[in-house]
Image (tube, rainbow, N blue to C red):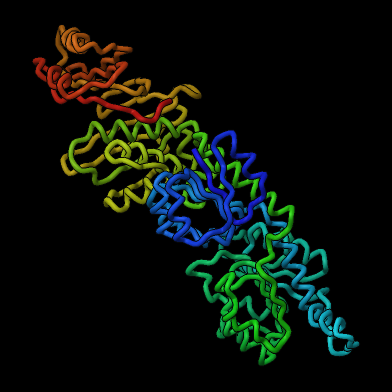
């Protein structure tokens, strides 16, 4: 396997990845050049300079993971990667301190007019009165976005004696208030409270042009704005107009709508107090090393068959979500594989019910595992990344419920598969603490250890049936590893099933021979790709 690293990433990344794959360090290149070489690589690691477009992703036939050595991934076409089943990872924590400190530094700069004062002094002038600033102590700092960076900015601001107000629909009011800040739910009520405003949110449909002419007019006259998040969150034309008019006293901007080509940026020609830096928020030696190490470790882990810790397009498999249910992931995938293979017709819906310990947990990772198992049995190229996308495109309805009805297992996952012909039910569980078993197939209570090659043989419960089936299997040079014969609970029931673990594949010729046995109907060969 081979990994391409570009955009001047710390060389330590290559040393981390090398035990798992070969590494090439190449300079930043345009789209057409990258398209020519990307087919030979299994992973791509970039910073912000390389735009990983849909065309590049389409050309990357062997790509398994794309890593962005930084916080955002707006230079990567995540939708295209997801549809191709390519994991996209970033380093959400690696440059937290660097970005927060740059925010604070810019806040000091606009409060004390440091940049224009420095330029004036170097020109030989002594304009003390012209550059009179304001103190941060006692002023109100408004923070939009209370993630790790926003939280650290708040901690420093509070230590400086500032008042802090926070607006973030995803933040906990209790956590904000416990820190000593004020939580403001509505932005309409937020704008007019602040002497300084800093943004720490991703760029998306909700945040583009978040600060514009309309919202600026709701702010205090003389407000100072800082943006170290993403270009386009503050409308550049509207900000220039507000600074030139004096309504906004000052601004500090580290990010721009069109990077690195900012020749046309209106802020360059601002006449008022504005500090512009070339996307330096994460540009410290410590931060660059941290993000390189973080993303390199994730790439190495994925290429070695493990999982990523910060995959942006597999939110259900984040470590905090995965850890509580990780022991059930493989049995969930096996249940999905088995259920779809015993079902005839076109799959229409999958219903998942959690019982026991699972009823109290977030089972979203298990839903993805069931989908991956089911879809990979009928389609190629399905993985944990694209399974939900493929299911949606195929019109498969997915529902999950939790049941408090007692069960005989630590945790029980029951999956109902509905097709245009009928339905089947498969239940997977952990027996004791860590023994995975298929414990139900339709009306049959079982205890089957999932294995790669399995035969399910419904039959009439009468003498010599087991011997006849075993004879056909043996005559075709297929070894039987184990067999489980199950009858329905009703003692008058005449139907049973054999679940047979075999050591090799069973072709259609053998299945036809088994089906010719009087009393056997609709035998199925099951192949489980996910191995426990």
Q: Quadrant of residue 211?
A: bottom right
Residue 49 higher or lower than 217, as above or below:
above
Residue at image position (55%, 35%) is 20
Q: Quadrant of the C terminus?
A: top left
Q: Is residue 259 visible?
A: yes
Q: Nearer the viewer, residue 443 or 405?
A: 443
Place of residue 522 in the rendered image (x, y in percent of width and height, measured from the top left):
15, 25
Q: Nearer the viewer, residue 167 or 510?
A: 510
Q: Nearer the viewer, residue 43 or 171?
A: 43
Say whether residue 321 is left or right of residue 364: right
Q: Is residue 319 visible?
A: no
Residue at image position (56%, 39%) is 300
Place of residue 351 in the rendered image (x, y in percent of width and height, measured from the top left):
32, 42
Q: Quadrant of residue 402?
A: top left
> How many numbered marks appear?
0
Q: Quadrant of residue 520?
A: top left
Place of residue 26 in the rendered image (x, y in percent of width and height, measured from the top left):
57, 52
Q: Nearer the viewer, residue 476 or 446?
A: 476
Q: Residue furthest bottom?
A: 245
């Amino acid at each position: 396997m081979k990994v391409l690293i570009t955009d001047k990433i710390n060389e330590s990344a290559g040393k981390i990845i090398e035990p798992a794959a070969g590494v090439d360090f190449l300079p930043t290149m345009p789209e057409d050049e990258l398209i020519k070489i990307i087919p030979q690589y299994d992973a791509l690691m970039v910073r912000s300079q390389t735009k990983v477009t849909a065309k590049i992703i389409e050309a990357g036939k062997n790509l398994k993971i794309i890593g962005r050595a930084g916080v955002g991934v707006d230079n990567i076409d995540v939708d295209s990667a997801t549809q191709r089943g390519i994991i996209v990872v970033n380093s959400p924590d690696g440059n937290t301190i660097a970005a927060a400190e740059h925010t604070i530094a810019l806040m000091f700069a606009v409060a004390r007019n440091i940049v224009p004062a420095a330029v004036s002094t170097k020109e030989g002038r002594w304009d003390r009165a012209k550059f009179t600033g304001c103190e941060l102590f006692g002023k109100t700092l408004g923070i939009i976005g209370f993630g790790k960076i926003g939280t650290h900015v708040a901690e420093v601001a509070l230590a400086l004696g500032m008042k802090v107000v926070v607006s973030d629909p995803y933040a906990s009011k209790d956590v904000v208030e416990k820190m000593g800040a004020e939580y403001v739910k509505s932005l309409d009520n937020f704008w007019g409270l602040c002497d300084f405003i800093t943004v720490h949110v991703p760029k998306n449909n909700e945040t583009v042009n978040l600060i514009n002419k309309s919202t600026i007019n709701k702010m205090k006259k003389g407000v100072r704005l800082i943006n170290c998040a993403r270009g386009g969150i503050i409308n550049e034309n509207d900000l220039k107009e507000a600074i030139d008019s004096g309504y906004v006293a000052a601004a500090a901007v580290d990010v721009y709508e069109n990077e690195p080509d900012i020749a046309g940026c209106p802020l360059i020609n601002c006449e008022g107090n504005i500090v512009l830096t070339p996307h330096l928020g994460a540009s410290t030696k410590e931060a660059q090393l941290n993000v390189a190490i973080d993303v390199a470790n994730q790439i190495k882990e994925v290429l070695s068959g493990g999982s990523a810790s910060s995959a942006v397009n597999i939110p259900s498999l984040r470590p905090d979500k995965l850890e509580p249910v990780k022991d059930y992931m493989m049995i969930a995938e096996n249940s999905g594989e088995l259920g779809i293979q015993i079902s005839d017709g076109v799959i229409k819906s999958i219903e998942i019910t959690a019982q026991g310990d699972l009823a109290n947990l977030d089972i979203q990772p298990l839903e993805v595992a069931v989908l991956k198992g089911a879809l990979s049995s009928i389609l190629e190229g399905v993985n944990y990344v694209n399974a939900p996308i493929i299911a949606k495109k195929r019109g498969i309805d997915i529902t999950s419920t939790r049941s408090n009805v007692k069960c005989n297992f630590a945790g029980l996952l029951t999956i109902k598969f509905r097709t245009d012909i009928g339905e089947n039910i498969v239940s997977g569980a952990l027996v004791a603490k860590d023994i995975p078993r298929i414990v139900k197939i339709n009306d049959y209570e079982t205890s089957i250890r999932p294995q790669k090659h399995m035969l399910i043989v419904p039959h009439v419960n009468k003498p010599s049936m087991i011997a006849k089936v075993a004879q056909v299997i043996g005559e075709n040079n297929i070894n039987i590893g184990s067999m489980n014969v199950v009858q329905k609970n009703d003692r008058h029931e005449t139907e049973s099933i054999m679940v047979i673990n075999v050591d090799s594949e069973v072709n259609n010729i053998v299945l036809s021979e088994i089906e010719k046995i009087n009393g056997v109907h609709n035998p199925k060969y099951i192949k489980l790709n996910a191995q426990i």
